[in-house]
Amino acid sequence: MDTWKLVALDTGTSLIEKSILTYLTDVGQTVRIPRVMWYLQGAQRVLVDTSVDSEEVAANIIGENLSRSPDQEPANALRAVGVDPKQIDLIIFTHLHWDHCGNLALFPNSRLLAQRDEVRYAYAPSRFFERAFLSPQAGLVPPYLGRRVELLGGDEEILPGLQVLLSPGHTPGSQAVRVKTARGWFTIAGDAIFTYENLEKDIPPGFHVQVDQALDSMHRIARVSDVVLPSHDYKVFGDQLVVELGG
Ligand SMILES: [Zn+2]
């Protein structure tokens, strides 16, 4: 039985400008988004993305607000599903933007996996994207610095029933994580798909390095998935979608 259990952990909320999510659409509107961290349990204990470090990083470096209750602290959110952060075996980064790879000091025993193209770009992106990656080129310290990141070169099976799919466009080395569950193949899209609206209205993510690739990646993820899980949509917490631990 190479099926996995999957749970979406709520690790905080932010208010952002809507067209960041949906390219050139609803410019000027403000929307509330969740900061999701995904826990997978199967052959190993796995996280997909590790959320934002802190309210201070969000406010002082990025200029975005984050509010986080004690229950939404990543360590507490994991403990609420019966997992000690030190037990996490493996972390797969969908990409290396600041809000997807924080909190790594909580996980000293985890292997870290990302696409080689992502690690290369994140260190020295174009000027516009330096802060989003916390790049040393902007005088910042990316969270993974000082840790070994195992580099992937495209689509790969990581463990039975757990695959990554290269999904570029939002960033050069974005990847989606496809997981076999008792209810079919679920795909954690990362920021290749911010919200269900991107899919329903066929609108690419508003923040991207290559918009045509971004659209292609959305379509590919949808094609190979029974259920798509966007990165910043409150609907993922509904139990119609997410296979809860023990559920
Ligand atoms: Zn991103």
Image: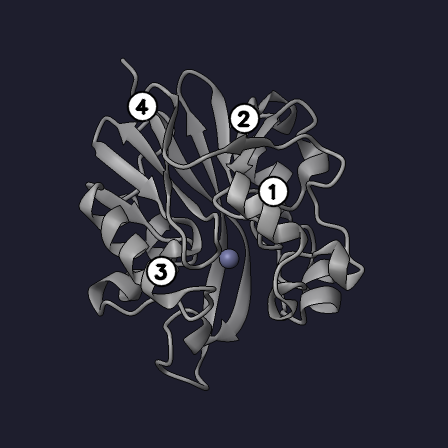
Counting residues from the start of the chain, the first of labels 4 and 1 encountered is: 1
The image quadrant of residue 136 is bottom right
Counting residues from the start of the chain, the first of labels 4 and 3 encountered is: 4
User: Residue 73 location in percent, x, y?
Assistant: 63, 46
| Type of amino acid under label 4 | Gly
**Where 29 sits versus 41, above or below?**
below
Q: Is mark 2 within 8 Å of ligand 1?
A: no
Determine if residue 80 is in view: no
Image quadrant containing the C terminus: top left
Q: Secondary structure at mark 4?
A: loop
Residue that label 3 marks: 214
Foreground pick, 67 / 88: 88
Residue that label 4 marks: 161
| Type of amino acid under label 3 | Ala
- Residue furthest to the right: 139
How many neighbours does mark 3 have within 10 angstroms: few (below 14), some (14-19), or many (20 or more)? many
In this picture, residue 65 sits left or right of residue 145: left
Tell us which disc is closer to us: 4 or 1: 4
Q: Is mark 1 within 8 Å of ligand 1?
A: no
Counting residues from the start of the chain, the first of labels 3 and 2 encountered is: 2
Counting residues from the start of the chain, the first of labels 2 and 4 encountered is: 2
| Type of amino acid under label 2 | Leu
Label 3 with label 1: CB-CB less than 8 Å: no
At 63% across and 56% down in the image, what residue appears? 133
Q: Is the image coloured rainbow, by chain, by secondary structure, or in one colour?
A: one colour
Tell us which disc is closer to us: 3 or 2: 3
Label 4 with label 1: CB-CB less than 8 Å: no
Q: State the separation of the CA atoms marked 3 and 2.
A: 27 Å
